Image (spheres, rainbow, N blue to C red):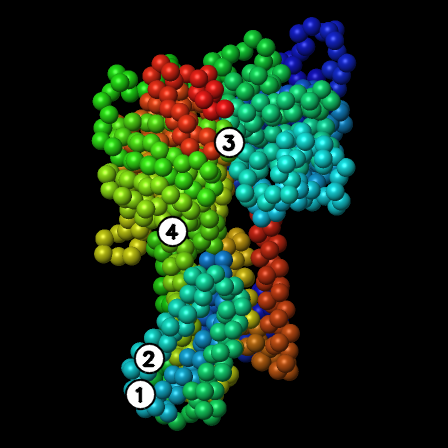
């Protein structure tokens, strides 16, 4: 009876079968790390077959809550009940045995093993459901392929499969779609509806507001470790959701109010000089060849379905991907042969790669050291080999503040202590500090909340205004349509379409991707 | 470890006298140097089983250069530094550029160097011909503090600054923590690994030369016995200061602790072979302990 009443059913005696005992109930969960409170008296319920979305700014405590529910972390206080009975979760294993499965925000797969091996990891024998789960996830054809050869989207699906094989009653998905394009997202939603029809409850965490309205029955808004809203999805709009998210964060930040546009003033602004020209570049990874140009002062979007070859193309330019077979690249009118990141940096090209966990974050280092890694050779105290740590701290803090990173003293914290979205901001800050003429960004907003996403696009626009050429690869078409001057569509390594001006609508871009 | 000190003190009241503390620190100095050198490799996520062999080779060859081939002290030092650089460059190149397994390469290198000791010394003990001024200097003390107890902390401090305060050190650590991310961030992974191996070999070479001075003589395979204690020191260090990470201050403390044992055992009059049991036991215990501490942290993080 300690409930605040927010959960009172609207029509008491409607088609209620199981309302009396929610499948999952969290009561007054509190968790702090050192002095920092990550969760404070959080109470949440999830009904049988219900999809509850958790929303909130980066660092709001969503992942922490899901870790507590799934036994990865033990709360300082509070309890978790399943079907009305308190379960004292001792470990993730215990939670799985109780029927609670978590697909965490971080990818945890073994790239050198096959899809099947990854799926049954930790299970003693091949479970009977394997074929069924693989079919559900559309992985049947690739079961014997090495997982490393497939992209992050497939790896995410494998992680979901791993959870499904254990027959969960409650499945927690922490930002499952961050690297998904529309097609994968729709597939996932189909799977989720199947699961809920079987009575499986879902906790769904995402920063993509449309998705939440589509899939969730109820939305729980979190901010600074507390629950600040708990509403049925029916009737909500994305603006309402944005308000819930912003309402929690200190709402006086300038970009929180009003609509922000990132499109350059006078949208047909004269183009600057050509900074990047890619002519017929083909890698061993895809059969198509890419051709396009990028000019100073413009923000160009690059999209396509997952597997279209965007990341392998960008990595090829950076010298960390599949080798180039043919084609040429010019930076600022001079030929550039992709070989390694240092050469690219020397020519004024930077890549902010996708998949921060694997490609960017250095565990065991502080945020400052992480952000400063590529620029550290340029930041020495005069006449000594030593780093200018004070200068570095100032530069990093400033950028992190600009990107709305939480907590505010993050700069000296270990990188592991940051939430997913905030860690992504550290990755951005790292490369914003590097002088460049051409900036390539691969899914820069992965896991970043709505408001910080706006900040990022503002920063990208500012970079373009300084005379850089900016290429943003994203599977979130909507975001690109809002922020880019034009959009390139890639399919199988080839730029198959370019849309700009009035032709640049979400619908048309999505159609061009197929 | 505190318990150990207390036990040793009870077994022999000389254990905690000022003189014996200097003795302990003096005998810990060179092993600590080698352990710090090893830390550089471990920080990169690599392995080096040749640290003892490099030091030993240096001890014997340095003596041989002066005694058998009449090189002056300075030129012998220069030659040895060049040799150390070459050894580190060779192993580092094989590991970094040829992608060979560091464990295997350094075991191989160790065996080659052990053989080299016999070669350069003609399998004979060298005692005359080593620069007496050098020996005297190494054995002297400065206001009561043994010279080695001054040199070793200086070297440790240099390595600590290198790892903690320079771009190179940051790159070394990034390679150990997430090699892929280091590559994406523009770190020259291969060259950095090569440099790491060179630094380690150089420091081990220096430690070996200092040991020539400390012993005043040289005979193949009787140099510093530091392989196990070095690893133990690094792992004790990883368990102590920065949880789960190799670090120089931790290694120094670990090295001192690891060399208390033989000293204590000696004073306690325990038979000689028991050091084997203790060293092996300590190494395994240190690794285990580091694992427990790091594991506990991971489960929470
Ligand atoms: N190991 C840790 N040590 C210290 N603080 C931590 C640790 N893990 C999380 N935190 C802090 O707890 C708070 C909540 O983090 P959490 O990961 O739950 O956020 P989130 O809502 O999932 O954010 P995001 O949308 O960015 O993923 C953050 O302020 C974070 O810095
Ligand atoms: Mg999170």
Query: What mark, if any, has residue B79 been given in the picture?
Result: 2
Q: Nearer the viewer, mark 3 or mark 4?
A: 3
Can I make out residue A368 in this image? no
Q: Earlier in the sequence, mark 1 or mark 4?
A: 1
Q: Earlier in the sequence, mark 4 or mark 2?
A: 2
Q: To which chain does the residue with label 2 belong?
A: B
Query: What residue appears at the point 47 percent right and 13 percent down from the top-left corner?
Result: A239
Left or right of residue B7, residue A265 in this image: left
Where residue A210 appears, x then y in whole percent? 52, 18
Does mark 1's beta carbon lie closer than 8 Å to ligand 1?
Answer: no
Whether callout 1 and callout 4 share a subunit is answered yes
Whether callout 2 and callout 3 share a subunit is answered no
Q: Nearer the viewer, residue B61 or A513?
A: A513
Which residue position is annotated with label 4? B187
Q: What is the C-alpha distance between the residues marked 4 and 2?
A: 31 Å
| Element under disc 3 | loop
Whether callout 1 and callout 2 share a subunit is answered yes
Q: Nearer the viewer, residue A237 or A474?
A: A474
């Amino acid at each position: 009876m300690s409930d605040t009443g927010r959960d009172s059913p609207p029509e008491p005696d409607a088609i209620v079968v199981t309302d009396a005992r929610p499948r999952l109930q969290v009561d007054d969960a509190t968790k702090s790390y050192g002095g920092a409170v990550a969760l404070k008296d959080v109470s949440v319920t999830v009904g049988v077959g219900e999809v509850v979305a958790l929303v909130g700014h980066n660092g709001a405590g969503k992942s922490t809550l899901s870790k507590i529910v799934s036994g990865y972390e033990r709360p300082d206080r509070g309890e978790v009940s399943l079907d009305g009975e308190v379960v004292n979760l001792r470990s993730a294993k215990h939670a799985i045995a109780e029927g609670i499965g978590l697909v965490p925000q971080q990818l945890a797969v073994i790239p050198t093993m096959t899809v099947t091996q990854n799926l049954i990891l930790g299970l003693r024998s091949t479970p009977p459901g394997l074929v069924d789960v693989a079919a559900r996830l559309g992985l049947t054809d690739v079961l014997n392929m090495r997982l490393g050869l497939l992209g992050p989207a497939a790896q995410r699906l494998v992680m979901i499969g791993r959870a499904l094989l254990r027959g969960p009653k409650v499945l927690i998905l922490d930002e499952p779609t961050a690297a998904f394009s529309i097609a994968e997202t729709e597939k996932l939603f189909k799977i989720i509806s199947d699961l809920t029809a079987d009575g499986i409850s879902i906790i769904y965490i995402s920063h993509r507001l449309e998705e939440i309205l589509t899939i969730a029955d109820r939305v729980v808004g979190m901010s600074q470790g507390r629950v600040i809203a708990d509403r049925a999805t029916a009737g909500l709009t994305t603006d309402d959701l944005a308000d819930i998210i912003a309402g929690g964060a200190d709402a006086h930040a300038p970009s929180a109010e009003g609509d922000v546009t990132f499109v350059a003033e006078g949208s047909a602004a004269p183009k600057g000089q050509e900074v990047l020209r890619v002519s017929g570049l083909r890698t061993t990874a895809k059969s198509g060849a890419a051709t396009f140009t990028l000019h100073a002062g413009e923000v160009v979007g690059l999209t396509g379905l997952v597997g279209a070859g965007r990341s392998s193309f960008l990595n090829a330019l950076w010298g960390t991907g599949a080798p180039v077979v043919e084609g040429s690249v010019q930076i600022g009118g001079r030929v550039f042969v992709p070989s390694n990141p240092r050469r690219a940096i020397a020519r004024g090209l930077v890549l902010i790669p996708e998949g921060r966990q694997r490609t960017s974050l250095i565990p065991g280092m502080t945020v400052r050291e992480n952000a400063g890694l590529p620029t550290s050779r340029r930041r020495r105290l005069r006449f000594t080999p030593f780093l200018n740590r004070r200068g570095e701290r100032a530069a990093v803090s400033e950028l992190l503040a600009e990107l709305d990173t939480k907590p505010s003293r993050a700069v000296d914290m270990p990188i592991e202590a940051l939430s997913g979205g905030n860690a992504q901001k550290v990755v951005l800050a790292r490369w914003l500090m590097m002088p460049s003429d051409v900036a390539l960004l691969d899914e820069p907003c992965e896991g970043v909340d709505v408001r910080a996403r706006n900040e990022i696009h503002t920063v990208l626009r500012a970079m373009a205004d300084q005379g850089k050429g900016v290429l943003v690869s994203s599977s979130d078409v909507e975001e690109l349509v809002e922020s880019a001057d034009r959009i390139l569509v890639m399919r199988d390594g080839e730029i198959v379409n370019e849309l700009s001006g009035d032709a640049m609508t979400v619908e048309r871009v999505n159609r061009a991707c197929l | 470890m505190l318990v150990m000190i207390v036990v040793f003190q009870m077994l022999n009241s000389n254990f905690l006298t000022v003189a014996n503390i200097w003795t302990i620190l003096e005998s810990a100095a060179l092993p600590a140097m080698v352990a710090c050198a090893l830390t550089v490799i471990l920080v990169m996520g690599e392995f080096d089983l040749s640290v003892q062999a490099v030091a030993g080779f240096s001890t014997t060859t340095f003596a041989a250069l002066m005694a058998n081939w009449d090189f002056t002290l300075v030129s012998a030092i220069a030659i040895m530094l060049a040799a150390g650089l070459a050894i580190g460059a060779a192993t580092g190149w094989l590991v970094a550029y040829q992608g060979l397994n560091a464990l295997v390469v350094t075991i191989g290198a160790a065996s080659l160097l052990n053989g080299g000791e016999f070669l350069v010394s003609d399998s004979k003990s060298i005692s005359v011909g080593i620069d007496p001024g050098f020996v005297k200097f190494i054995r002297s003390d400065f206001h009561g503090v043994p010279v080695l107890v001054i040199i070793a902390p200086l070297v440790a401090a240099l390595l600590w600054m290198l790892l903690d305060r320079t771009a190179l050190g940051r790159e070394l650590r990034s390679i150990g923590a997430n090699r892929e991310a280091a590559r994406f961030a523009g770190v020259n992974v291969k060259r950095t690994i090569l440099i790491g191996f060179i630094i380690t070999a150089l420091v081990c070479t220096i430690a070996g030369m200092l040991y020539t001075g400390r012993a005043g003589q040289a005979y193949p395979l009787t140099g510093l016995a530091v392989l196990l204690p070095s690893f133990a020191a690094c792992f004790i260090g990883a368990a102590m200061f920065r949880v789960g990470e190799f670090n120089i201050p931790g290694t120094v403390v670990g090295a001192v602790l690891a060399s208390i044992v033989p000293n204590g055992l000696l004073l306690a009059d325990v038979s000689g072979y028991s050091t084997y049991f203790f060293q092996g036991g300590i190494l395994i215990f240190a690794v285990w302990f580091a694992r427990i501490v790091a594991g506990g942290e991971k489960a929470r993080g």
